[in-house]
Structure formats: structure tokens, C-alpha cells
Image: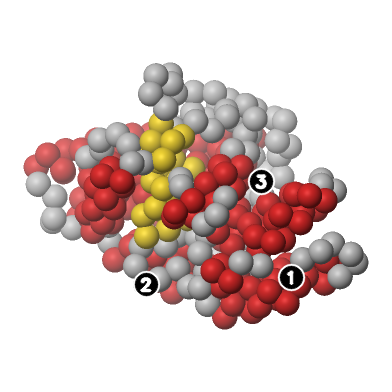
Amino acid sequence: MSLPPAPGFAPSAARGAALDAAVRARLAESLDAIADSAEDGIPCDRDAIRALGRAVAAHPVRSAVMVRYTEAVTAVTAEDLPATEAALAALADPALRAPPGPALRVMTLRDADLGPGGADAYRRVMDDDPETPLAVLPLEEPALRAASARVGDAIALLDDGFAEEIGAVAPEILAVRGRPGDRIQFDGATSFHLWGCFALNLGRPRHPIELATAIAHESGHAVLFGLTMGGPVVANPDGERYASPLREDARPMEGIAHATWVLARMHLAVSGMLGSGRLDATGRAIAAQSLQSIARDYAAGLSVMARHARLTEAGAAAFAPAEAYMASQGIGR
């Protein structure tokens, strides 16, 4: 299956829907392959998994589908038969075939939101960096209701194209909080293996502009994952480490490239907020300061990439319109 072409940099509902459809088409093929391979003797409801594949191909589904699929692939690769049987049983759950619903959904890390065993499954998929173990907790009900309202207010500050694209590539937001006392607090996370969702720390106060920028940040990662079909942006080995524009610690080039592309998207989002006429004086000051920081971090990331990055074909296609946009703002090469 070929990669989708990289469209213009401006977000849109059409681009989001196209990326989601492309990811789901590949996922549906993989689910059929899992059902076929299970015929070799792994006990499971193959018909239910094929039915899930048909649903995935036909319409958007909840992020739990990709999470459960990732768990199944991980278990099969590890040749862990009990884990494989459990993962395939989870894929057979009819609840996974339902569409996510028409509105953006804010949920938290609990089975009531994510399905039986869902909290642990989402944790396992998110906790993929052994150097920085995941340290997040679910929100309690009052905080979750408040978080949903805060997300709605923040997204309302973004241009319609952003809001509509986010609704296509990440209609679910996993609201969590950091552990009290941790020196480094979790801010947010996006993974191709969470397709349809990203996680945000909504357990601490943020100005609506800061929250809107964070949403643009995380959804930007989702869009880039869609543009590359979860493949790498760069060909640099993961073992190589470089200075990162967004992290204190040195990072692999893949992370730096993702961060740099996403900074361009954040710049576009904040510029749109500044030009909307909807911000008060305090909001304009916050947005203007944020724009300066974003431009500085983008230039730093691009400088590291210019010296060391080896872009893949998909990475180069995704970066071309991002660089063109930032260059039009007088930032970059």
C-alpha cells in the first residue's frame, strides 16, 4: 500500500479524513491477516476479527482498536501464547466495531472509558520508552468534567481547519495527571499505536491559549504519523543522540524531526489565534511570547536536522510544505 501524498501544510477536515482513511485501510488489511494466521491453531473468534476489519475499513473507529491490535502484534512477535490469546479475544469484542461518535471525546485512564482491561492496555502502549517510564494517573470525575470543558474552550480558539482535522485524526483525548512530587511532569504523548487519540496532562492549570497550543502540538504528531503511515521520518539510527529543541536530554533524530515539524504546526496555530481578533490583551501577550519561543525552538531543531538528519522519502515529502510555511514567516533556512 503506497503512502498518501503530502498535501499543503494548512490543516483541514479533508486532509484529516484522508489520513484516517489511509491508516484504517492498512489496519483493516492487517486485521484480516491476523485472522488468517490464527487459522494455524491459535484459538480465537476469527469471524469477529474479520468483522472488525470490515468495520475499520468502512468507518472511523475508536482508538482502542489500534491499541488492541498493537497488543496482539506485540504478543505474536514475542511468541507469547497466553498474551496472544488474550489480545485476540480483546480484538473480537463487538464494542470495538462501533464508530467513536460525532463529537470530540475526552476520557481518562480507566476501564469505564476504555473498556475491560483498557486502562492497562493504553498504559502498555504509551509506555514505550524505557529511559523515561510513564508516570501518569487518571483524572477523578469532577476534574474530568472540567477537563472536557477546558478542551472545548481551547479548541474553539483554533482555526476551523485545525478543529476539524483534529476531529478526524484524534477524536479522543486521554486526559491524565502527573504523579505528585515527580521532578519531570508528563505533558502529553502521541503514538501511531494510539491512532485516533492522544494523551494530555489536564491535571494542572493552563491558560486556554497554552492548552490550545498543546492540542495543536499533540495532534501535529498524529498528522505526521498519518503522513508517514507510522514509518520513520529519518533514516538515522535510534542509538544516535542529538540536542533536542523541546527536551533537556539528548534525543534520537526521529524525535527531533517530529518535534521540529510539530513546532511549525504550533506556529501556524498560534499565528491563527493572534490573527483571529478573539484574544484579549492578556491572550495576545501570551500568544506573542509563545510564538517567539516556537520560532526559536523550530530554528534550533532545523539547525540540528540540517547538520545530521537523513530524511526518508516520506519524511522529506512531509517536511517540504512545513519548511515552506516557516520560510514564508522568515524562519529557517
Q: Is residue 25 left or right of residue 245?
A: right
Q: Is residue 241 left or right of residue 195?
A: right
Mark identifier at residue 198: none
Q: What is the secondary structure assignment of the residue under circle 2?
A: loop
From the viewer's perspective, is residue 153 above or below residue 57? above
| Residue picked out by circle 1 | 45
From the viewer's perspective, is residue 212 above or below residue 105? above
Query: Between residues 72 and 276, which one lies in front from this camera angle?
Result: 72
| Residue picked out by circle 3 | 234
Q: Residue at x 86, y 70 (%)?
A: 39
Does residue 325 show up?
A: yes
| Residue picked out by circle 2 | 102
Q: CA distance from mark 2 to mark 1?
A: 29 Å
Q: What is the secondary structure assignment of the residue under circle 1?
A: loop
Circle 2 or circle 3, nearest the eye: 2
Q: CA distance from mark 1 to mark 3?
A: 39 Å
Q: Earlier in the sequence, mark 2 or mark 3?
A: 2
Circle 2 or circle 1, nearest the eye: 1
Q: Position of residue 78 (x, y in %)?
A: 81, 45
> What's the residue type where badge 1 is placed?
Asp
Q: Earlier in the sequence, mark 2 or mark 1?
A: 1
Q: Position of residue 223 (x, y in %)?
A: 50, 58
Asked whether the beta carbons under mark 2 and mark 1 sit within 8 Å of each other, the answer is no
Q: Residue at x 50, y 36 (%)?
A: 301
